[in-house]
Image (cartoon, rainbow, N blue to C red):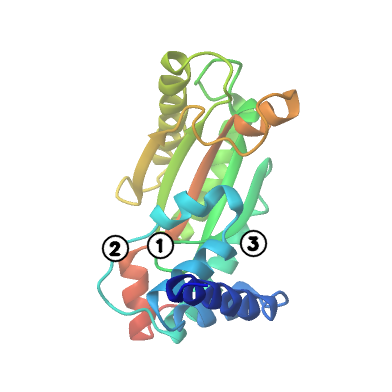
């Protein structure tokens, strides 16, 4: 085995060994471990493995670009705060909530809304149930207003990109605009994008898979201000 390959293999084994001992940890503990991880390569690998399979690429892009080192204490503090945000989001009807790892290897929250719950077929006007669900979610975003937000719209592969791409953009914008109308700061929402059918999470050849692919995802992740507060010991 070549030296480069052996080194990469060793890193993978180390990361898997570390993670195998973390299965019972909550995100506070994971945040401390990941935040204090030695070496950029190992940190990035741990972040990828902790994230869900569908978020390997996207998770790496979520997060404030910072120059400061994120220490173990910072990761633990932010992990604890994001745990609380995730628990609050789980109370929102029709929301599927997961914790992932952002670009800084810090805990982030992914909230997914099924497009079938939010919109009529091929439409992007929010229905009444969707507005009720998003009103509850808006309260959480306002409570955790030091978390930055990214919103992504997705479709299944039925139809052409000429239809799916603008539909996904419009649906993401509908969610973003409604949240802002409820008092969520426009400055908190850092990104609103449509992904069309390009990032499926399930098999588009089945009805069940297509249903999962039609979705709007909202990410809550540590802002630079939150990271600085955690570094300074002032984040609660």
Discs 2/3, front: 2
Tell which circle, 1 or 2, labels the residue nearer the N-terminal end.
2
- Distance CA(mark 1)–CA(mark 2): 8 Å
Q: Nearer the viewer, residue 228 or 4?
A: 4
Of the image marks 1 and 3, the number of the one nearer the N terminus: 3
| Helix, strand or loop for disc 3 | helix
Q: Are marks 1 and 2 in contact (CB under 8 Å)?
A: yes
Between 171 and 11, the residue placed more toward the observer is 11
As drawn, the label of residue 65 is 2
Give the structural element (helix, strand or loop) at label 1.
Answer: loop
Q: Which residue is mark 1?
A: 103
Q: Secondary structure at mark 2?
A: loop
Query: Picture coordinates of residue 191 (x, y %)?
Result: 35, 44
Image spot of residue 224 (x, y percent): 31, 66
Q: CA distance from mark 1 to mark 3?
A: 22 Å
Outermost front residue: 1
- In the depicted structure, whether residue 206 falls above or below residue 39: above
Of marks 2 and 3, which one's residue comes earlier in the chain?
Answer: 2
Please state if 213 lies on the left or on the right of 208 as rendered: left
- Asked whether residue 28 is in view, the answer is no
Residue 129 screen position, x and y as percent:
64, 30
Q: How many marks?
A: 3
- Looking at the image, residue 27 lies above or below residue 173: below
Which residue is farthest left? 67
Task: Kindly identify which numbered label has been placed on residue 87.
Answer: 3
Name the front one of labels 1 and 3: 1
């Amino acid at each position: 085995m070549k030296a480069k390959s052996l080194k990469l293999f060793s890193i993978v084994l180390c990361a898997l060994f570390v993670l195998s001992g973390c299965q019972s940890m909550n995100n506070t503990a994971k945040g401390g471990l990941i935040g204090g991880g030695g070496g950029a390569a190992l940190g990035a690998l741990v972040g990828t493995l902790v994230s869900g399979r569908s978020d390997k690429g996207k998770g790496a892009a979520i997060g404030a670009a910072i120059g400061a080192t994120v220490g173990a204490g910072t990761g633990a503090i932010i992990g604890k705060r994001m745990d609380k945000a995730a628990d609050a989001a789980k109370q929102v009807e029709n929301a599927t909530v997961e914790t992932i790892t952002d670009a800084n290897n810090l805990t982030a929250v992914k909230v997914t809304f099924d497009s079938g719950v939010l919109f009529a077929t091929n439409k992007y006007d929010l229905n009444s149930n969707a507005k009720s669900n998003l009103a509850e979610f808006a309260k959480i975003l306002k409570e955790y207003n030091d978390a930055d937000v990214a919103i992504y719209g997705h479709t299944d592969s039925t139809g052409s990109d000429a239809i799916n791409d603008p539909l996904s953009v419009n649906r993401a914008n509908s969610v973003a605009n409604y949240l802002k109308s409820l008092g969520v700061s426009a400055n908190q929402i850092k990104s609103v994008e449509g992904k069309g059918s390009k990032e499926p999470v399930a098999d588009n050849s089945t009805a069940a898979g297509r249903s999962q692919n039609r979705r709007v995802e909202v990410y809550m992740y540590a802002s630079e201000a939150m990271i600085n507060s955690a570094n300074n010991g002032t984040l609660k």
